[in-house]
Image (cartoon, rainbow, N blue to C red):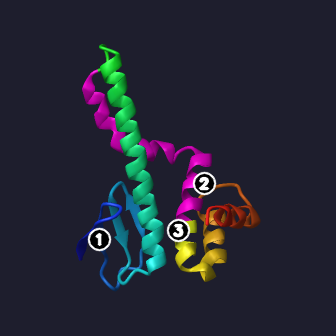
Amino acid sequence: MIRAQAWPPAIVYIRDPGDRRWAKQRGPFIAVPYAPSAAIMAHESHHVAQWWAITLAAGAALAALAVGVPAVPLAVVGVAPGVMGLCMLIPAFRFAAEARAYAAGARIAPELLDVYARALATGYDTGRSLDECRAAIIARL
C-alpha cells in the first residue's frame, strides 16, 4: 500500500505483512514494514525532514553559485537531491543524522532508548561505544 504523508512531505510504501525487511528512507520516500510503529515512522520521517532541509539548502547554494558565476550553468541545481546521500558518506555527519533520527523515535517510545543506542553502535560502523551512542541520542531528545 502506498500513501502520502503531509509533513514532512513523503511517499510511504507499507510493505506486505510477510515482508520482514527493515524500514528505510531514500529522499522523500519511506518503505516500512506492515503496521509500522509511531516510533519507526518518527525515525524515518526525521530522515525525510533532513533530506528536505539539505536538498533545499544545497539547491539555494547551487542556484546562487550559478547566478554569481556565469561559467556555472543553472542546471547544476539538479544535483541538489543527491547531496544528502553524499553527506551520509561522512562518518561524523551520518552519526549525527542517525542519532537525531533515533532521538525522534525515542521521544515517542522512550523504553526503546537502549535498543536504539545498540542499533546506532553496531549497525552503522560508527566506531562509537554503546555509552557514547546512548549519550548522543539523549543529548538530542
* Main SS class of the magenta portion in the image: helix
Between circles 3 and 1, the one closer to the viewer is: 3
Whether residue 22 is visible, yes or no, is no
The foreground one among 57 and 112 is 57
In the rendered image, which residue does mark 3 sit on? 104
Query: Is residue 39 depicted above or below 69 in this figure?
Result: below
Q: Looking at the image, is mark 2 or mark 1 earlier in the sequence? A: 1
Q: Is residue 13 magenta?
A: no
- Within-10-Å neighbours for mark 3: few <14, some 14–19, many 20+: many
Identity of the residue drawn at 37% across and 57% down = 26
Which amino acid type corresponds to the residue marked 1 in the rendered image? Answer: Tyr
Query: Is residue 53 depicted above or below 36 in this figure?
Result: above
In the rendered image, which residue does mark 1 sit on? 13
Spatial CA distance of label 2 from label 3 is 14 Å
Q: Quadrant of residue 1?
A: bottom left
Identity of the residue drawn at 35% across and 18% down = 68
Between circles 2 and 3, the one closer to the viewer is: 3
Which amino acid type corresponds to the residue marked 3 in the rendered image? Answer: Ala
Identity of the residue drawn at 26% across and 26% down = 74
Instruction: Indicate left or right for 2 with 56 as reference.
Output: left
Q: Looking at the image, is mark 3 or mark 1 earlier in the sequence? A: 1
Q: Quadrant of residue 112?
A: bottom right
For the record, the magenta segment spans: 73-102
Spatial CA distance of label 3 from label 1 is 20 Å
Task: Label 2: state its secondary structure.
Answer: helix
Q: Is residue 93 magenta?
A: yes
Q: Quadrant of residue 109?
A: bottom right
